[in-house]
Image: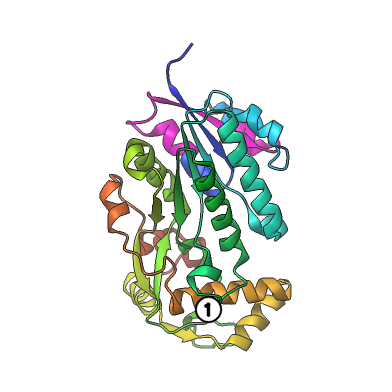
Amino acid sequence: MTDKKLITVFGATGNQGGSVVQTFLHDAKLKNEWSVRGVTRDVTKDSSKKLAAQGVEVVSADLNDKTSIVEALKGSYAVFAVTNYWEKMDDKLEVQQGKNLADAAQEANVEFLIWSSLHNVNKLSKGALPHVYHFDSKATVEEYIRELGIAAAFFMPGFYMSNLPGGNFRKSDDDDDGTWTLGLPFPGQTQIPMYHPGDTGKYVKAMVLHRDAVLGKRFLAATAYMTAEQIVADFQELFPSQTARYFEVPKDAYFAALKGAGLPDFAAEELYENMRLMSDFGYYGGDSLDWTHGLIEDPLTTWKGYAKTAPAFAGLK
């Protein structure tokens, strides 16, 4: 039998979990100390088989079934737990799934639970932004984990830089001069905590290497705060043949675009309030990234570094 510690990773074929799996498989400091179990709903999927071929123990569990989660966690020293609100857009379901994970971690005697969390925006904004359900639901689970008193820390992902190219940052359909426009519903000086999901494993590595220091703490996962105008300026520097600008999108236009993309009204309101969080209260409530960065030893992906490889920007000079 191996004497390696076992980390069990939920969402092992997704963005956050997938990065954690790859880091623990390949990082020089971790690969000889840790074995990896990946949890997925369907072990027969190609993505699951690919993980198994890399040496991951792939198991199936249903977040709605605590018994199956306990089974998946048996023997785990650490657990990286993440849920996907956007799959069903049901905050009550997400809270229940998170509580199932927490209860299972307690029952399985897990030594270190890392919960992918976010701020409670309703509380942070003192009720001004009551509809950011995908933040508040994760925060509710965090509160529950704290109440249980289990050994845990809270991974707090920033704003996905991968959401910009081709989405909020694209060539305008009706713009004949080929100008790239970054359009968001807040002022251009708003601070955005830029996070690359591919870096998740680097943050989680730091958390397990500094377990005692991070217990009970929030670990802010972002490379840097950048303003929308800085994001545009970096794009121009990277691709000098292109022209780009920032445009503050009016609320009505932002709603219309989201509804046009098929989102229901409540989700459009949710995303709008999510954006207002950044400008009005701060994504992390104004907290500094310095403590997190002091514990991380691997270089984090910069916006420029990511933009060079973004498919939507392919071929630009």
Where residue 146 appears, x then y in whole percent? 50, 47
Name the residue at 45% across, 65% down.
Answer: 315
Q: Is residue 30 magenta?
A: yes
Give coordinates of residue 201: x percent, y percent.
Answer: 43, 43
Residues 153 and 310: in front is 153
* Residue at 65% over, 41% down: 100
Of the pair 291 and 236, the residue shown nearer to us = 291
The amino acid type found where label 1 is placed reads: Lys
Tag 1: Cα neighbours inside 10 Å, few (<14), some, or many (≥20)?
many
Q: Quick check: can you spot residue 43?
A: no
Measured as percent of width and height from the top left, residue 161 is found at 46, 63
At 43% from the left and 69% from the top, the residue drawn is 316
**Magenta stretch bounds:** 21-50
Q: Nearer the viewer, residue 255 or 176?
A: 255
As for residue 142 lying within the magenta part, the answer is: no
Q: What SS does tag 1 mark?
A: strand
Q: Quadrant of the C terminus?
A: bottom left
* In this rendering, position of residue 65 left or right of residue 192: right
Give the answer, above or below, for where 47 lies relative to 36.
Answer: below
Q: Is residue 197 above or below residue 21?
A: below
The residue to which callout 1 is attached is 171
Q: Is residue 105 above or below residue 234?
A: above
Q: Which of the 4 image quadrants contains residue 175?
A: bottom right
> Can residue 278 be spotted in the picture?
yes
Query: 2 or 79: nearer the eye?
Result: 79
x and y, in percent, of residue 92 in the image: 70, 57
Q: Quadrant of residue 10?
A: top right
State left or right for residue 38 relative to residue 281.
right
